[in-house]
Image: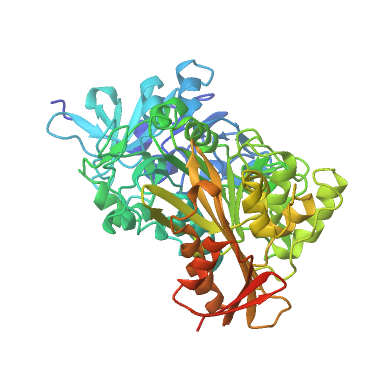
Amino acid sequence: MTTPSYVSAEAALTCITRGTRVFVGSGCAEPTLLVAALAAREDVADVEVLHIMTIGDAPYARAMSDRRFRHNAFFIGANVRQAVAACAADYTPVFLSEIPRLFRSHRLRVDVALIATTPPDEHGFVSLGVSVDIVRTAVECARVVIAEVNPNMPRTHGDSFLPVGRIHRFVETRRPILELPVTPPSPTSSAIGRYCASLVPDGATLQLGIGEIPNAVAASLTHKRDLGLHTEMMSDNVLDLIDSGALTCARKTLLPGKAVTSFCMGTRRLYDRVANNPFFEFRPTEFVNDPFVIAQNEKLFAINSALEVDLTGQVCADSVGSHFYSGVGGQVDFIRGAARSIGGRSIIALPSTAKSGTISRIVAALTEGAGVVTTRADVDTIVTEYGIAELKGRTVRERALALISIGHPDFRADLLAAAKARHFVTMDQIAWPVNQRPYPVEYVSDARFGDLAVHFRPLRPSDERLLRDFFYSHSAETVYYRYHSQLKSLSPQQVQQFCTLDYDTEMALAGFVTDGEAERMVAVGRYFIDPPPATSAEVAFTVHDELQGRGIGRYLLGRLAAIARERAIDTFIAHVLPTNTRMVNVFQHAGLAVESRLDERVDTITLRLT
């Protein structure tokens, strides 16, 4: 084994001269000693400093006035944001998966790579530690590689090892590895996390980021089983999933038993866990972020964030208007990978407002100058603290309605007016209830009826098409029993009213079965108080003809009764035709006190919920 010869940081950097392009290691693996020594150089000019986001100091971004350095950001972090905004530094919009190709093709030449590594092992290899990402490719392409060797850097498994012979100069340090504190979720983030978690099935493979919302999502997933991980970045939130038994990677279809990532940013707790741990597989972004690699994971669920979303589904994630804020990163890589994954799904999660509630993040049109990171053709699902909007395969009208329904209530009227003015929705579209509760994800449930698995959830405004399809699947007898007339069609206003609920004085639970990668409505149960604030409610439900007699109606009634009790409703009233014996039997065997009165050929059934 070749024993490295260590030199000072100043001596190591003498190869950097005027016009040199310097790559700096990523995230928490920033070589801080080398960065400080580089910024102290007074004898250089026009040195271009390249990197994705780094967590430490970026003194070269404050040294622009004398033209010694100019930073080029592939992803804008807080330490360089002001310089980019002032055009004292540059921003290169690029998918994270494609940065390695820029290096290999020499479109962006890398002269010198400054990296952080572990000390050499007994075999003559160092590990790149917590950041493999684009660092490995930069090392392979650089003319000179300078390593800041640090015994505090964890030795990680995967494609993180470099032979000592690939490194030209070594600098020794014992500085602590940079850490990113855990951000506790706010109530808003926690609500978003619960909605996201409600969409994730057991056995799914996750892509999660860092920050409040990913932390909240992870906290809401601890009851799941056999989750996997294939993510560009990893933070402490993964550890809680592992410790709860939720994340095992046992059911992954690509690299089963391995939690795959390209870099991690977090606390020492995370670094100690990944050290010498073969469960964690660190790979370069050209592998981890390749959409075709991502798609090899079945049920890949990608969860990312955004700054604003317009009513057609366009997602802005890298700028606030014309001011660049972050970067394209891996969002599109994973959204397109999830779209190709069998059973996969992508989710954009964001708070409904910004600036202390004064600005809506769901907007009629993106702010002037805002960039589209995820196109309206790529977008799948949007989540805010007010609910879930499923956009994939939906019309512009359906998208606008779904997004308005998860906007902050203070902005829904303006959003609806803007949607009408732009002819996204019809002029007679009904408004949302003024006091609408947030979407009640707590009432989502799953049940089996023999060999049939049914997923139940409250109706959403975006369910109009599913409800209409359900209505037209009824036999004439079922329509007559449900509506007491030979109703031939439902008007747009009727469908809107059925799907637009306040979830307080009215509730509707629908049952769905899977149909390929879509869902098909097979049952609906609802109650409504008329008029509020009465303590009794009218109840009705319908089950698809082919599935009647399996107990689905009894299940719906039980769930609605439990919700009604929470709302201080003590009585259900149902109007049933006497010949509808199946429905009468459901009420008679519901385990509730039942009274029946025949009036004008309609049986009025009263159920005491207490």
Q: Is 524 situated left or right of 153 in this image?
A: right
Residue 415, given in percent of the width and then of the height, sits at 78, 54
Q: Is residue 456 visible?
A: yes
Residue 219, given in percent of the width and then of the height, sits at 40, 60
Residue 576, given in percent of the width and then of the height, sits at 63, 67
| Camera-nearest residue between 406 and 289 | 406
Q: Is residue 179 visible?
A: no
The mark tally for this picture is 0
| Camera-nearest residue between 480 and 515 | 480
| Camera-nearest residue between 106 and 267 | 267
Based on the displayed image, in which of its 4 quarters is residue 119 positioned? top left
Quadrant of the image containing the N terminus: top left
Q: Is 325 situated left or right of 339 in this image?
A: right
Based on the displayed image, in which of its 4 quarters is residue 289 positioned? top left
The residue positioned 53% from the left and 78% from the top of the image is 566
Residue 18, given in percent of the width and then of the height, sits at 52, 25
Q: Is 463 situated left or right of 401 in this image?
A: left
Q: Is residue 246 above or below residue 373?
A: below
